[in-house]
Amino acid sequence: MDRYDQIDVFIGLDVGKGEHHAVALDRSGRKLYDRPLPNDERRLRAVLTELQQHGNVLLIVDQPATIGALPVAVAQASGAIVGYLPGLAMRRIADLHPGEAKTDARDAAIIAETARTMPHTLRSIQVTDEQVAELTMLCGFDDDLAAQITQVGNRIRGLLTQIHPALERVIGPRLDHPAILDLLQRWPSPVELRAAGEKRIAARMLKLAPRKGHDWAHEVIEALGEQTVVVTGTNAAALVLPRLAAQLATLRKQRDDVAAEVERLVDAHPLQPVLTSMPGVGVRTAARLLTEVAGKHFPTAGHLAAYAGLAPVTRRSGTSIRGEYSSRRGNKVLKNAMFLSAFAALRHPESRAYYDRKISQGKRHNQALLALARRRSDVLFAMLRDGTLYQPRDDLSAVVEAARTANVGGPGNQRG
């Protein structure tokens, strides 16, 4: 925390759904406040106003988002400095304090004492701009929708496999197409599909799949001919399948609506041209980069890579050298976005050449992709630091090296 010398009161807040617990210490360690605190704006403001009479206040939370969002917003609006103590650091520091109890009061006291004596462990929380805040919420909802889509799709395929495996092999892989979902809602059982016939099936599918309707209808009829017995439970499946198909169609429509809103917000953000200029970065990846990186300060490219969990970890003990391994820590959301972005970038000649070089060195597919993601992380750091677009040129390695050795600036300072 850059303004640590100006702080007079250190407030540790262990956040909770119904109420928080706050412990406030002055610079000498004297306890100024220690009691539960309702998750209520009026009460939060009252406590902050009371403690601000002792001087400048630093509020430290263990969860800056979700249930900790209101205290952070109230503290920022009240003029207090706000910080964040990462969970891993919190757990390690708690081991240094006597006692094994796990209570809100003890956790809040540890947070406050850590802020007072070890400010280097804290992370600053900057005021998030409205676009990033909206993107964070929409991306979370998009993740929920994606999980539900996978769940419902798997349920449909499971039922089809149970009653008619051959039909599932034709329909299952195409559940992302509206024509297939419409088919399941209109004729959900093998008996109804046989009664409809190929011509009626094709005529209905052509409305939503004009190029593939005839072929898919023919494949459906052929699959029906591979099984003559009726499996127990087919009638019940015929009642469930159209409802699942309608549910899946609704979820996909909702996700399309969310994607359109995400695209609008990303397009309006000043960092959009910078992010999307990098190969393999589309709207959803750009949104993830904004929610996970924008507003945060990284002194060097290595700090960004470590935050994303892309920095390799060396395992060595005495004369035993086990090499370098992928880190299991870091921001999982950012790491996944960078990994998928690297995979999408394999169509780009420079990225493909780097990936092939790693494969030729004996690395497996995922290892080579992680190496590519790390390299792209360094490039991304330089782009955000300088506000420049991606530069596809032969001396790109010089840009990467400059990013790794830079010790000033960072993505948190770039706003376009």
Image (cartoon, rainbow, N blue to C red):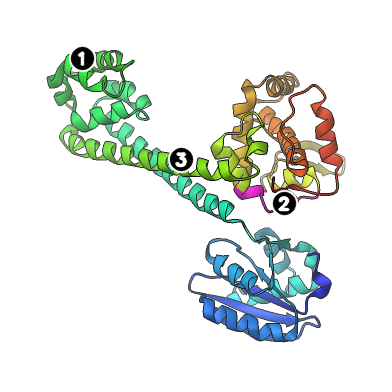
**What element does badge 1 sit on?**
loop
Q: x, y (%) of residue 312?
A: 75, 39
- Mark 3 or 2, nearer chain start: 3
Q: Is residue 264 left or right of residue 320?
A: left
Q: Amino acid at mark 2?
A: Gly
**Label 1 – label 3 distance at C-alpha:** 42 Å
Q: Amino acid at mark 1?
A: Gly
Q: Amino acid at mark 3?
A: Ala
Query: Which residue is disc 1 drawn over?
Result: 225
Query: Which residue is disc 3 drawn over?
Result: 260
Q: x, y (%) of residue 290?
A: 62, 46
Does the magenta stretch mainly form a helix, a strand or a loop?
loop
- Mark 1 or 3, nearer chain start: 1
Residue depicted at 71% across the width and 75% down the height: 112
Q: Which quarter of the figure is the N terminus placed in?
A: bottom right
What number is the disc on residue 412?
2
